[in-house]
Image (cartoon, rainbow, N blue to C red):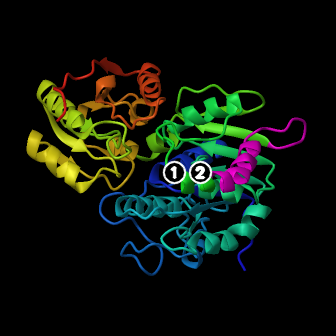
């Protein structure tokens, strides 16, 4: 039986996995020469059977986790001998799973132990995953999570006995997590609105004890009790006994780039339409206006954007649609990338300035006009999006693009 790791990380998205690697790099603070640059062009380097990109099973992932000095005396991977085990809890959508496969390969190339654990897709998958992970969760002394709003992660937190809990960025949601824990509120995603009728209220009531336990886990205990750390690129301030460590993407900058710059402008897509926050017609007009104004040629799609929406955007604007197979921070750092990157309010307006520091790339953010919001958008949406823009560092502010009335 594989011994339990003293540090256990749970990730559900490619960005969360990237930020766990950044956290491990910051914690270890390696000196001297680092590991060789991982292969990013083509299929990532694999160390065992199934090199065609199949999702790694727990046994295979753990077997590949080693490190050390090779026969030729080459440097050991950064994570060789690390007590960190990364548990991937993949979503069901193909784009996220594909990016997670690539990120898992990079993590294994760094020498970390990676376990792929299905927790969705069938009625009993969550319970099976919980049973498979319970022993390791109870034994871990440090637990790292990427999404404190995840109901499955909150369920796992009821088993945690760790001395230390670390939250790494899951994008701008970290800003809301800090605000809600400071106010002692229950954890609710900023774009979520109430609904579901009576069945939804019954589920919320049944889940309330789990949510309350998770909220208590995120409250540091003084003295020799539990420590809580937030590892973030977002403009947040720790409260109480919570500690904050800044994620400046040192691992990404050390491993990749600097990128070759093109003469054009790249646009960054957002899933604000898919989450029901922004009206689709308004979004299309805003993208069209930005394309014309800035001479944009490429559109980096968010992994949650629907194929139908992207086809419409391409037909209406002539933009080349790029579906990245890695988080945008790595794609941009590897290059080629435009000298200007334009985004709506999103995580990348905070992370790209770190990842691309010193490269000469300008990151610009376009405000979201309140008129773009749908009738079902949460009351918090307007102020939250404005806050994402207002607090971004080292970016150029662009006014909201005027769009005709939808419909």
From the viewer's side, name the closer residue of 384 and 1: 384
Evaluate whether residue 66 shows in this view. yes
Q: Residue at x 67, y 74 (%)?
A: 132
Q: Residue 223 colored magenta?
A: yes
Placement of 397 over or under 15, stated as above or below: above
Q: Residue 200 colored magenta?
A: no
Left/right of residue 126 with respect to residue 36 in the rendered view: right
Evaluate whether residue 355 shows in this view. no
| Residue 143 locus on image (x, y percent) | 70, 53
Give the position of the C terminus as an image quadrant: top left
From the viewer's side, name the closer residue of 365 and 360: 365
Q: Quadrant of residue 276?
A: top left
Secondary structure under tag 1 reads: helix
Residue 201 disc label: 2
Residue linked to disc 1: 197
Secondary structure under tag 2 reads: helix
Placement of 33 over or under 402, stated as above or below: below
| Residue 9 locus on image (x, y percent) | 63, 56
Left/right of residue 120 with respect to residue 94 in the rendered view: right
Query: Which stretch appears magenta?
Result: 204-226
| Residue 329 locus on image (x, y percent) | 39, 42
């Amino acid at each position: 039986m594989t011994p339990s790791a003293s540090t256990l990380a749970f990730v559900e998205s490619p960005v969360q996995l990237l930020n766990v690697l950044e956290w491990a790099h910051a914690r270890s603070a390696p000196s001297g020469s680092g590991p060789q640059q991982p292969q990013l062009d083509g299929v990532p380097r694999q160390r065992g059977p199934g090199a065609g990109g199949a999702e790694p099973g727990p046994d295979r992932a753990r077997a590949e986790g080693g490190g050390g000095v090779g026969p030729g005396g080459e440097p050991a991977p950064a994570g060789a001998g690390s007590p960190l085990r990364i548990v991937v809890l993949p979503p069901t959508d193909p784009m996220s799973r594909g990016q997670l496969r690539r990120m898992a390969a990079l993590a294994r190339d760094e020498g970390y132990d990676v376990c792929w654990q299905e927790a969705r897709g069938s009625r009993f998958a969550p319970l099976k995953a919980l049973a498979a992970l319970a022993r390791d969760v109870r034994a871990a002394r440090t637990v790292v999570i990427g999404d404190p709003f995840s109901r499955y992660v909150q369920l796992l937190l009821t088993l945690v006995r760790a001395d230390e809990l670390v939250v790494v960025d899951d994008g701008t949601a970290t800003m809301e997590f800090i605000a809600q824990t400071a106010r002692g509120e229950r954890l609710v995603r900023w774009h979520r609105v109430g609904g579901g009728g009576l069945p939804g209220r019954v589920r919320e009531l049944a889940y309330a004890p789990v949510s309350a336990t998770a909220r208590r886990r995120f409250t540091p205990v003084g003295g020799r009790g539990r420590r809580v750390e937030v590892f973030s690129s977002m403009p947040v301030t720790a409260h109480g006994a919570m500690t904050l460590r800044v994620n400046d993407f040192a691992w990404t900058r050390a491993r990749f780039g600097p990128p070759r710059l093109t003469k054009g402008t790249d646009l960054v897509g957002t899933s604000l339409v898919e989450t029901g926050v922004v009206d689709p017609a308004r979004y299309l007009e805003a993208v069209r206006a930005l394309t014309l104004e800035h001479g944009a040629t490429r559109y980096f799609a968010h992994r949650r954007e629907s194929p139908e929406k992207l086809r419409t955007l391409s037909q209406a604007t002539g933009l080349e649609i790029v579906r990245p197979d890695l988080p945008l921070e790595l794609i941009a750092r590897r290059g080629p990338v435009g000298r200007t990157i334009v985004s709506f309010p999103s995580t990348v307006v905070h992370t790209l300035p770190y990842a691309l520091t010193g490269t000469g790339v300008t990151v610009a953010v376009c405000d979201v006009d309140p008129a773009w919001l749908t009738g079902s958008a949460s009351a918090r949406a307007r102020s939250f999006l404005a806050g994402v823009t207002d607090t971004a560092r080292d970016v150029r502010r662009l006014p909201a693009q005027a769009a005709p009335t939808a419909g």
